[in-house]
Image (cartoon, helix red, strand yellow):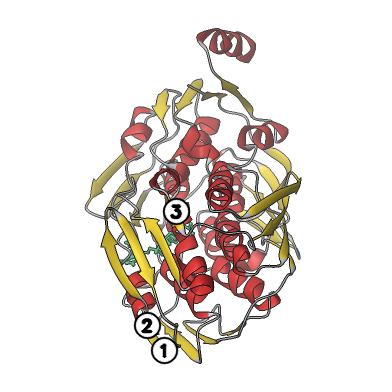
Amino acid sequence: MEQYAIKGGIPLVGEVEIGGAKNAALAILAASVMTDETVLIENVPDVRDVKVLLQAMESIGAIVKKVDRHTYKINGSQINNLTIEDDYIKKIRASYYLLGALLGKYKKAAVALPGGCNIGSRPIDQHIKGFKGLGASVKIEHGLIVTSAEELVGNHIYMDVVTVGGTINVMMAAVMAKGQTTIENAAKEPHVVDLANFLNSMGANIKGAGTDVIRIKGVEKLHKTEYAVIPDQIEAGTFMMAAAITKGDVTIKNVIPKHLESITAKLIEIGCEIEESDDAVRVVSSKPLQHTQVKTLPYPGFPTDMQPQISVALALSQGTSIVTESIFENRFKYVDELTRMGADIKVEGNTAIITGVSGYTGASVSAPDLRAGAALVIAGLAAEGITVVDDIKYIERGYEDFHIKLKKLGAQIEKITAEKDFSKFRFQAV
Ligand code: UD1
């Protein structure tokens, strides 16, 4: 099993390039099969979730051609199967975006029902409500969500909760529906906007993405396009936090600073200096970090996908911080691992009460999920001694070349697979 071995205590210094946004790429790749013409997509991150989605697309007959590491040509004209198997859904929940894409194009789709995920229960009632609102029937049969319609007709759809996945799926189902669809209480995340821009570049008529009311006028069909995915807000935020807790000075390049505002605001509050330019942010951490309050919220609020990383920083900040997780109920699973490294965190329901400590000490810890795994790595970068992070397959779902990028910033980190690799790392790290 692969692990990261980290020798902590080195301030990160230098520049890091951020890749394409995983969550935007997943939605855009799924939507790319909605035309029979060939679509070119650039700035696709080379991460495991993307690879699994591409395999799921190939399994139903889509032609996927890799142009280079980050560029794909997709052609959906040969799709001959409208059922996405359980295997793909088990590996990556976002393969359910093919439900909206196939329903929108072929008026029919079946996708294995996503099971429980390790950050909390994740219902899909709002996706189903949206499909039904457009006139589709939705049944659960043999573990599959089976949806079909004679025709899809635009409608007024009110989302009871702000859901990124629900907004994306309903948007895809509605682009070729008859008439106008209005999605109220829509998610405003940058990747929702990116998907809308992508679909519009294929001939869709979507207005209002990025606000909580999205208006979609159905079009007959979609056509080819060339499109580049936006930079990954969460990858950028993770490096910003890594700079903060290692007392570093890191310029994070190829970002959209506006997407990082909630993260930037919190870093300034806890004592970092931030310089913004058109497509970069520089984080300088030279003073002792201070406590603050954080509540995760839908965009433009503080992202739940950054909650573990900021908690790792707050656990090293002076005073007592309160972190409230309002999106997913089971997102404090990394706390026990962080406690093993010396953190003082008490979780009560959806709130973590964090009392700052003066430092972490290296330990063997396991990544419980993608973002928490990344958070444990950055904790290791700040810890005294050696940290080994296990189960890094979770981290590789969403971070391209994570340890390579960290190494370029001066971190002592290696991917290891065997005891002898660890002995070598320990020997070299002293
Ligand atoms: C997406 C992101 C994930 C991020 C999350 C919140 C992708 C591939 N994943 O996940 O990284 O953490 O947004 O920003 O983009 N809910 C319902 N009913 C539904 C759908 C959702 O009650 O039908 C609830 C969920 O349980 C959760 C909240 O709504 O409490 C937000 O979930 P949602 O925005 O849908 O998250 P995902 O799209 O799954």
Q: Residues within 10 Å of mark 3 (few under 14, many from 20)?
A: many
Q: CA distance from mark 1 to mark 2?
A: 9 Å
Which mark is in front, 1 or 2? 2
CA separation, marks 1 and 3?
A: 27 Å
Residue at x 65% of width, y 37% of height: 401
Could you tell me which residue is drawn at 54 percent across and 17 percent down?
A: 417
Is residue 36 at least partly visible in the picture? yes
Q: Nearer the viewer, residue 34 or 307?
A: 34
Left or right of 67, for residue 305: left
Horizontal arrangement in the rendering, residue 341 relative to residue 286 (left or right): left
Classify mark 3: helix, strand or loop: strand
- Depth order, front residue of 357/33: 33
Is the residue indicated by label 2 positioned so its CB lies within 8 Å of ligand 1?
A: no
Is label 1 in a helix, a strand or a loop? loop
Tell me the kind of residue under disc 2: Gly
Where in the figure is residue 216, as x and y percent of width and height?
Answer: 54, 86
Contact? badges 1 and 3 (CB < 8 Å): no
Mark 1 and mark 3 lie on one chain; the one further toward the N terminus is 3
Name which of mark 2 and mark 3 comes first in the sequence.
3
Question: Amino acid under label 1?
Answer: Asn
The residue that mark 2 highlights is 135
- Circle 1 or circle 3, nearest the eye: 3
Measure how far apart labels 2 and 3 are at the Cα level: 22 Å
Label 2 crowd (10 A; few <14 / some 14-19 / many >=20): some
Q: Which residue is mark 3?
A: 84
Mark 1, residue position: 155
In the shown orientation, is residue 417 left or right of residue 221? left
Q: Give the amino acid at mark 3.
A: Ile
Q: Residue 154's spot in the image, x, y percent?
A: 45, 88
Do callouts 1 and 2 mark residues in contact (Cβ within 8 Å)? yes
Other-residue count near label 1 (Cα within 10 Å), few / some / many at <14 / 14–19 / ≥20: many
**Ligand 1 located in image quadrant:** bottom left
